Amino acid sequence: MPKTATYTASCLLAGLLTLFSSSFAHPEAVFAQNGSQANGSTTMDRIQIAQQNRQKLLGEDTTAMDTTDPELAAIRDRLVYGELADKGTLSLHQKMLVTMVVLTASQTTDDIYVQTKAALRAGIAAPVIREAVLQCTPYIGFPKTQQALRYVSKCFSDMGIDVPENQATVTEESRFADGLARQKAIFGDAIDKMHASAPEGQKDIMVQHLTAFCFGDFYTRKGLDLKTRELLTFAIVSTLGGCEAQVKAHVQGNANVGNTKQNLTDCLCWMMPDIGFPRTLNALACVNAVLK
């Protein structure tokens, strides 16, 4: 074969081998070669940011998904830690507490232990973490809250942390009046109208227990301020789904205590990977309906 033909054939073979091998390159390497996305960042940037943020918050801890399905965990991490962790109007502490109540409300208890450690690593005091979980009680019930507290308490115990058990500020005699004061601080005189319009035979639920139990026993506790409790309540009822009336009420309540429409929108964006799009969009529609 002439030298020119031999050289041409060799080049062609080398090119085919290069093309063939590139087709089986590691996916992250291929993504990194794809250049910039519409927002100006490369895919590899997102991966690196996710790794850094995850290391900062979780350290060497692993979630249940890391073990059972690492591919799905990688997609999650690049979204949560690579895109959402550093964005929005919520502070890191707010995001961590929102995660705690979302996991509790959805009964996704596998990761509560790891997320409790992450919240502690982020500098949130143990009593504050516990109060966030307790705030779920009137909305999801005692059994589900207790299920989550088992993991929280186990984490505290393993880390040698003693948490004060009693953060209550009310007495048996004051819980209704103190709860009513908190209700009015959030919803104003609308509470008087609701109490007056409650049908006979239903006042125990709509007046006595809602005011004394939900707001008296929980909203008056130490550890969380009113703005934080109301933000967490919005996250809890949004997580449950099918609670649009309550979501709308707490959208207005959040606005009344100083949380903005953007705060609530960013809260839903942070929650979205954990609760999915239907509940996220339904709650967002409630935000837009109340705060036009």
Image (cartoon, helix red, strand yellow):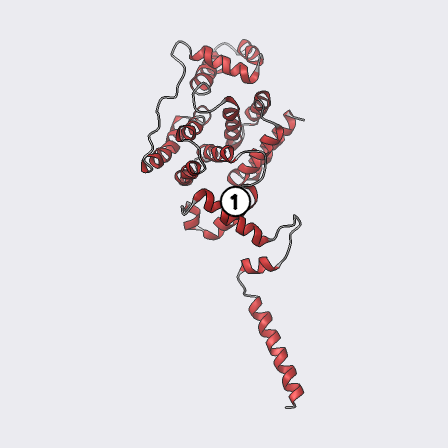
For mark 1, what is the residue? 81
Q: What residue sits 36% from the left and 36% below the top?
A: 151
Q: What residue sits 54% from the left and 64% below the top?
A: 25
The picture places residue 175, in percent across and down from the top left corner, at 42, 13
Quadrant that contains the C terminus: top right
Q: Nearer the viewer, residue 178 or 65?
A: 178
The picture places residue 236, in percent across and down from the top left corner, at 50, 29
**Is residue 234 found left or right of 125 in the rendered image?**
right
Residue 202 appears in the picture as rendered: no
Please, is residue 14 above or below residue 155 in the view?
below
Please, is residue 137 above or below residue 190 in the view?
below
Instruction: Residue type at mark 1: give it.
Output: Tyr
Residue 252 appears in the picture as rendered: yes
The picture places residue 105, in percent across and down from the top left corner, at 46, 32
Q: Nearer the viewer, residue 161 or 110?
A: 161
The picture places residue 242, in percent across and down from the top left corner, at 54, 30
Q: Residue furthest front?
A: 123
Q: Nearer the viewer, residue 89 or 70?
A: 89
- Label 1: few (<14), some (14–19) or many (≥20) C-alpha neighbours in 10 Å: many
Q: What residue sits 63% from the left and 82% below the top?
A: 9
- Element type at mark 1: helix
